[in-house]
């Protein structure tokens, strides 16, 4: 069964814990988009805000930042379950992944729409998850870029037991395509938090 990770980027930041409570019982993970205005043209939040989140769900921190290594100690300390770092944001992916695991978190690597899966070949043995971006990172509510579907299939071939997340432009239609391609975790922001009935929206992604 595919897992759902709502992205709080489209939630009301003024009442984050209420927003999270509204989706908690239907979700498998919570997706936290950390942005720094440098790696992406947008700014969100970091560890001090994440530390205030009350949830039983595992927290996956998607780091869309330059110098992601600076964030890891704090995220481990506040109980992040996993950290997703961008292939494009570092020259030293191996030590970054090793550090995440040393700190007791699961390690995940993301690729932008313009990055080919072959770039991940040598890191795959060391990661727990991969995140395929199906939009250019930075904003919610963008259109799904179909090249992501080929990438999911390629990555499944490269490492069959790899957990694959897809992030960006997920709705009931694109979710179906991602599941068919072999995705394990669907990250969705605007489709869930913008829905009148969030439970139904989440269920529609699974069916
Ligand atoms: C975009 C973020 C996504 C975003 C997805 O850079 O990584 O997690 O919240 O938003 P939707 O689901 O609206 O495309
Ligand atoms: Zn994200």
Image: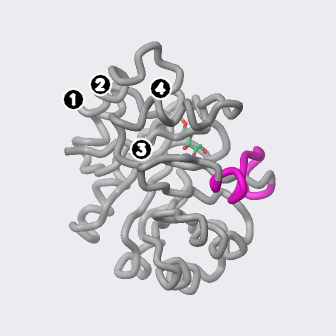
Q: Say whether residue 1 is left or right of residue 152.
A: left
Residue 149 place in picture, x, y as percent:
35, 46
Q: Do the CB atoms of the residues marked 1 and 4 lie less than 8 Å apart?
A: no
Q: Residue furthest right?
A: 37
Please give the residue where the numbered disc 2 appears in the rendered image.
Answer: 204
By what rule are the colours in the image chosen? one colour
What's the mark number on residue 207? 1
Could you tell which of marks 1 and 4 lies nearer the N-terminus?
A: 4
Q: Which type of secondary structure does the marked residue at label 2 adopt? A: helix
Q: Which mark is residue 191?
A: 4
- Left or right: where does residue 120 sit relative to residue 39? left
| Along the viewing direction, whichever of 115 and 197 lies nearer the viewer | 197
Label 4 Cα neighbours within 10 Å, binned few <14 / some 14-19 / many ≥20: many
- 1 over 69 or under it: above or below: above
The answer to which of marks 2 and 4 sits earlier in the sequence is: 4
Queried whether the magenta region covers residue 40, the answer comes back as: yes
Residues tagged 2 and 4 counted as in contact (Cβ below 8 A): no
Rate crowding at label 3 as few (under 14), some (14 to 19) or many (20 or more) other CA atoms within 10 Å: many
């Amino acid at each position: 069964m595919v897992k759902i990770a709502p992205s709080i980027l489209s939630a009301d930041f003024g009442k984050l814990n209420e927003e999270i409570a509204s989706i908690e019982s239907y979700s498998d993970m919570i997706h936290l988009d950390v942005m720094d205005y440098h790696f992406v043209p947008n700014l969100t939040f970091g560890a001090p805000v994440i530390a205030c989140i009350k949830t039983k769900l595992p927290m996956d921190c998607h780091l869309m930042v330059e110098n992601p290594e600076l964030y890891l100690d704090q995220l481990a300390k506040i109980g992040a379950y996993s950290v997703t770092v961008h292939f494009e944001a570092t020259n030293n992916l191996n030590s970054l992944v090793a550090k995440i695991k040393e700190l007791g978190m699961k390690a995940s690597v993301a690729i932008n729409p313009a990055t080919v899966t072959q770039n991940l070949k040598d890191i795959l043995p060391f990661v727990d998850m991969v995140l395929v971006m199906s939009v250019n990172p930075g904003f919610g509510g963008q259109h799904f870029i179909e090249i992501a579907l080929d990438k999911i299939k390629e990555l499944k071939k490269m490492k069959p037991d790899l957990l694959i997340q897809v992030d960006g432009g997920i709705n009931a239609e694109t979710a179906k395509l991602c599941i068919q391609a072999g995705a394990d975790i669907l990250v969705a922001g605007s489709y869930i938090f913008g829905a009148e009935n969030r439970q139904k929206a989440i269920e529609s992604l699974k069916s």
